Amino acid sequence: MTTRTTLALLFAAAGLLSACGGSDDNKPATVTTVTDPDTVADQRASALVAQMTLDEKIQLVHGVGTQTGPLGGAGYIPGIPRLGIPDYYTADSATGVYQAKNGVTVDNGATAMPSNIALAASWDTQLAYNYGSQIGKELRTIGYTEGLGGGVDLARELRNGRIFEYMGEDPVLAGYLIASRTTGTQDQKVVATIKHFAANDQETNRFTSNSIIDERTLRELQLLPFEIGIKQGKPGNVMCAYNLLNGIKSCENTYLLTDVLKTEWGYQGKVQSDWFMALTDTVRGANAGLDEEEGGSTDDSAGFYGVPTFFNQKLKAAIAAGTVPLSRLNDMVQRKLRTMIRLGIMDSPAPLGGTIDQAAGDVAAKAAAEQSMVLLKNATPAGATTPALPLNAATIQRIVVIGGHADVGVMAGGGSALTPPRGGNAVTCLNPAAMIGGQVTGCATWYKSSPLDAIKAKAPNATVTYLDGSDAAAAATAAANADVAIVFGTQWETEGGDLASLSLPDAVADPANQSYDQNALIAAVAASAKRSVVVLESGTAVTMPWVNNVHSVLEAWYPGTQGGAAIADVLFGTVNPSGKLPITFPVNDTDQPQKAISSTDLNVVYSEGLNMGYRWYDSQNITPLFPFGHGLSYTSFAYSGLTTAVDANGNLTASFTLKNTGLVAGAEVAQIYAALPAAAGEPPQRLIGWQKVQLAPGASTKVTVSATAERLAIWDITLHQWRIPAGTFSFTVGGSSRDPLALASKQAFAGKVLALTH
Ligand code: BGC
């Protein structure tokens, strides 16, 4: 049978071509046109698979190396021109396009957006869409098919070196944000990734650690952001993680990849291995549901990092031996092709080598940074009548800016989530170990976006001086002589290592200098300043032994390529801060459920069960430094008139009135938490919905927040299904998880088992 015949038969069988036949020859043939884009994509993909040789199929399911191919980047899979299948180029894109070729980073002008934890702090799904869309546009401009952003592992362990790449500690917040980010990217005809599936919550022993998690905790916490993100965002790619989950490598885990992801959640895209040691066995990986091996190499015996490639000749041999069914290989290919067709990539592959619109990128990066900064504290200095922030350029005469290399730039997180800095690193790294206080080794990157210059531009009539922070006594004297002292504290995170502590590490002012103690610097400045403001550039929570002695603390995260200007906008009130914490800031490291990260015990036991993140602090009655959901504004808000209703299916509607009771316009993230009936055995409260509302001074509005039934459900370990428990639910609405002014409302519900939906 020729290929052409095969194709025609296939289409006919699928009802795509006219269906002839029937007994009445006089009737015109009925033409059934399939229009559903998913069905069309599936049918076109299976027609292509039917035409492919075994070698061609094998070619499509493994990368041929990291930083290779015409574009460089994380991965490359050559296409099949005879079938119109284009080359497949993959780049890291957690914060922006990371292009590197043969070990050399390409300065392609890509925009560095703020880190993902910053995006999560915006609590803004539209912003998440824009963020994904901006990165998607730039990926496609360069020529990439797929972006590897989209980290959504939960912040169980705040010292995890990749917290800055993720979306915080709450599964619902993280899930909805990652769904929007995914849609934003895929609307640009670029395959989006959600990773690292699953429970990849620390970097220590990252290839071999074993996350041990009971079924209910796994479903209600670690898998839930993936479930929401994948069902709603429909990514073309899910990257499975390096770690083991309950004793089985994530990328060889049938329960995870097939039973839950593909069968239960109805996931149609492909599963891709993380890069180096995620896959250890061809048959186990293939039969568990892995669809693509990365990074891979052309060398089957020892590729990148000396790791053999499993989905090349070894897979071909397994197919020949029957240990991996051919249907499984066909499915691997089908999943890749259907996404390429569905997103329009097959018919319109990205041309290579376009020019990034940096000005447009800057606008997007600045907007994201401004909406993500969290004002943690803002006290009124002695003798003053208003809080320390915002600064008033008309009255301030002397400003001293101290530390954090704020004269030249803002810090970025490291590893594959870095977007290479346009025009190089603003800070020369001569002393990698000391540079970052010796917690992890490497060189931190600073983007050339100077907070000092931006502050000077805001206050043209003030005298603005800069001290590098290495001399605490000199900084204290300068602070005493200024109207305001702004100290920058930095904490660097990178893939591949965890933080020793959440305490600000020692920092190095210039590479030749000895390191200095950032906490001592802040304490010294606080002791003498009339008005002290701390700006933090961090990827996770920071402990603050000096918090009671400073007036204001602004968490700027790693704010991206426009960070300097965004920080100045918030300090001077051009932008009213509206970010809210997506993680709890504890007083001490050991307030966390996991007291320390073991470097020797590979078993990471999630013994806190459901009590993770704010659920832990709530259940243990531990007062955090700053609670989940916290964030101040330059205005104030009042909530009134909460009413709630739960319909027969368990869907909740909450309505209330929100008023801006202050003097300036501002946005409030109104958060709804639910306390489940006591018999359900849940932590005291969970976030079920929120809305970010912008209000003019004095204005008020009625806000309605809806939450689907799943948000009230628990995972039933007998039924292996979501179930809403019977009993009385309590709901609160407020401006944080511990807002003393939160309003409460109660609802009784009869209980319900939820159908499994895709
Ligand atoms: C990381 C992934 C990343 C990949 C490619 C891995 O080490 O865990 O997040 O996408 O490298 O650079």
Image: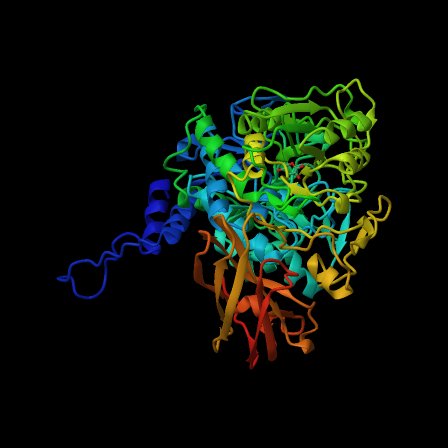
State the residue in front, 678 or 93.
Answer: 678
State the residue in front, 5 or 651.
Answer: 651
The residue at the point 69 percent across, 58 percent down is 614
The residue at the point 76 percent across, 47 percent down is 548
Looking at the image, is 66 positioned above or below residue 611? above
The residue at the point 62 percent across, 46 percent down is 385
Looking at the image, is 711 positioned above or below residue 223? below
* Image x and y of residue 358, in percent: 47, 26
State the residue in front, 720 or 445.
Answer: 445
Q: Quick check: can you spot residue 321?
A: no
Looking at the image, is 255 positioned above or below residue 746? above
Q: Quick check: can you spot residue 501?
A: yes
- Quadrant housing residue 390: top right
Quarter for ligand 1? top right
State how many labels appear: 0
Looking at this view, name the residue that lies furthest to the left: 26
Question: How was the colour assigned to the protein in this rendering?
Answer: rainbow
State the residue in front, 112 or 549.
Answer: 549
Looking at this view, name the residue that lies furthest to the right: 600
Q: Quadrant of the N terminus?
A: top left
* Image x and y of residue 43, in percent: 39, 50
* Image x and y of residue 309, in percent: 66, 35
- Quadrant housing residue 439: top right
* Image x and y of residue 91, in percent: 55, 33
Q: Is residue 193 left or right of residue 437?
A: left
